Image (cartoon, rainbow, N blue to C red):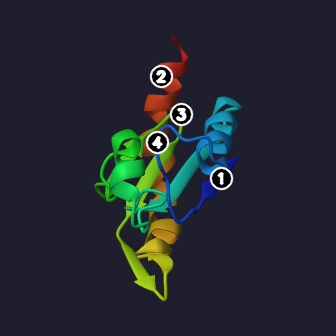
Amino acid sequence: MKIVFIPQFFSNGMGYTENILPKYLSNLWHEVVVVASDLQVYDNTRDYASNYERFLGSARCEKGDYMQEGFILHRLQHYSINNYIGLKGLAKVIVAGFHRMPSTYFNCKESAREF
């Protein structure tokens, strides 16, 4: 099954649903993609640098595709309207990109699982 999660934020090493659920669904051989913004969780708090930056790194992440624990993380540039986060190019990724991802990305996942 192909599954897409679209959270506003994704921060590596955290225990949020968007971190744990894709990992374990991928362990069950589902093709999982997470499409999130280029922002870390809590990026908009005044004390991000003192409280979170040591653990999470910069409040902004590089855009692009990253292989996580068995799933693909696709980071898009964000935009903000009244403190709500949107993802630039989201429709394009879902309509065009996801149909091509299994042949491009998931072959490396399947190869890794053989070991």
Give the mark nearer the N terminus: 2 vs 4.
Answer: 4
Q: Which residue is under mark 4? A: 12
- In front of the other: 107 or 14: 14
Q: Which residue is under mark 2? A: 111
**Pair 3/4: label in front:** 4
State how far apart marks 1 and 4 are (Cα). 19 Å
> What residue is at 46 percent from the left and 54 percent from the top?
100
Q: Amino acid at mark 2?
A: Ser
Give the mark nearer the N terminus: 1 vs 4.
Answer: 1
> What residue is at 49 percent from the left and 82 percent from the top?
83
Label 1 secondary element: strand
**Pair 2/4: label in front:** 4
- In front of the other: 55 or 103: 55
Question: Residue 77: where, in percent of width, then height?
Answer: 35, 69
Q: Which residue is under mark 1? A: 3
Give the mark nearer the N terminus: 1 vs 2.
Answer: 1
Kindly check if marks 1 and 2 are in contact, taking CB atoms under 8 A apart as contact: no
